[in-house]
Image: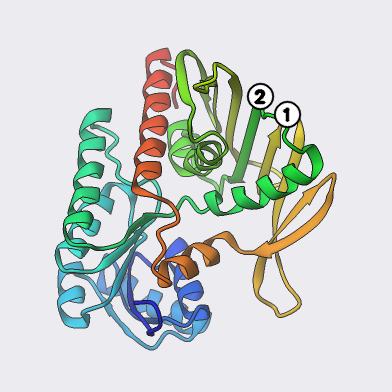
Amino acid sequence: MAGTKPRVAIVGARGIGKHHGNWWTTEGAEVCAFAGRSAESVAKTQETLAQFFGFAGRGYTNVEAMIAQERPDVVDVCSPAACHFEHARTALEAGCHVLCEKPFVYDPDAEREAILAKARALVDLAARKSLRLCVCTQYSEVSAVFARIWKKARGDESVHHYHGHLESPAKNRAPNPERIWLDLSPHLLSVLLRLAPDAEADWDTLRTRFNEYEACADFSMRRPSGDTIDCAIVTRNALRPPLNVRHFKYNGFPFAVEGEKGPDGIYCACIETPEGRFVEPDMMRVLIRDFMAGRVTITPAESLANLDMMLRIRDAARKTGVRS
């Protein structure tokens, strides 16, 4: 696919999928088609995509029919989480590379091991067919920027405390901490996994707070050396400004990530730190650029570890009985 103009089909393009489509187009791919739930929603989405990034392809209500007709190189799965497994499997079986929104695989009524088994099955299928499979925990991409800034500011100082805090607008939705955790925690966990790839969670230290519009977890990670990293993960739906919060801290050193349009009018990431302000390409754009170039920068092992951690913390919160 590297060096060519790939054809991309999106499953679920009304929400985050339209932004994926915009980045695919910006990076030089052809978004040839998308699939939606109904003829009515497809018609509305087709109009939205045409206005948003000049989409001129076709809309479908059936994923299998779309893939058979369009024969895309890539299928970008942005459907509801409970549909990820079926849509990703369908695309891989048809010989398409797959970019999949987080969470990798999910079923609110399934046990952790059953969910992980489905995720592993997708990883194995992609490997057998020599296809790329990547999950959109794109904050992994910005962790390299954090590491560069940290090295300049603190040298070889070890990180012993990690704090990740994400908030997104509630948008008049009812309180549901598990939904919030499902939506936001994979990003925070992805940065942690890059920060401490050799560490393992000490689940005996886990404490959770899932209530109303907040889902939080505190726990420790232990490195092979015996050193520990104390971790605080905060996810919320905001009811009042600021509606979007993307804050990270290493040993109290802050990284505040904001989105803004650059001089060329293209959306980018601005990282505010005590060392100054750093403007970087949008994380999702970088992920798509790498994928197009044949690089799966978020490995299957990372995606499985991320999913496992997310589910273990979900299960611990369920046992406390504090849910909405």
Residue at 41% over, 33% down: 310
Residue designated by label 2: 160
Left or right: 77 with respect to 155?
left
Figure coloring: rainbow
Q: Is residue 288 visible?
A: yes
Which of the marked residues, 2 or 1, is nearer the chain's N terminus?
A: 2
Q: Residue at x 70, y 43 (%)?
A: 240
Counting other residues with Cα less than 10 Å from the Cα at mark 2, is it few (<14), some (14-19), or many (20 or more)?
some
Left or right of residue 177: residue 121: left
Q: Identify which residue, 229 or 265, lies in the foreground.
A: 229
Camera-nearest residue between 2 and 122: 2
Location of mark 1 (residue): 251
- Per the image, label 2 sits on a secondary structure element best described as loop
Instruction: Tell me the element at label 1.
Output: loop
Q: Residue at x 43, y 13 (%)?
A: 320
Residue type beneath disc 2: His
Q: Position of residue 301 (x, y in %)?
A: 35, 42
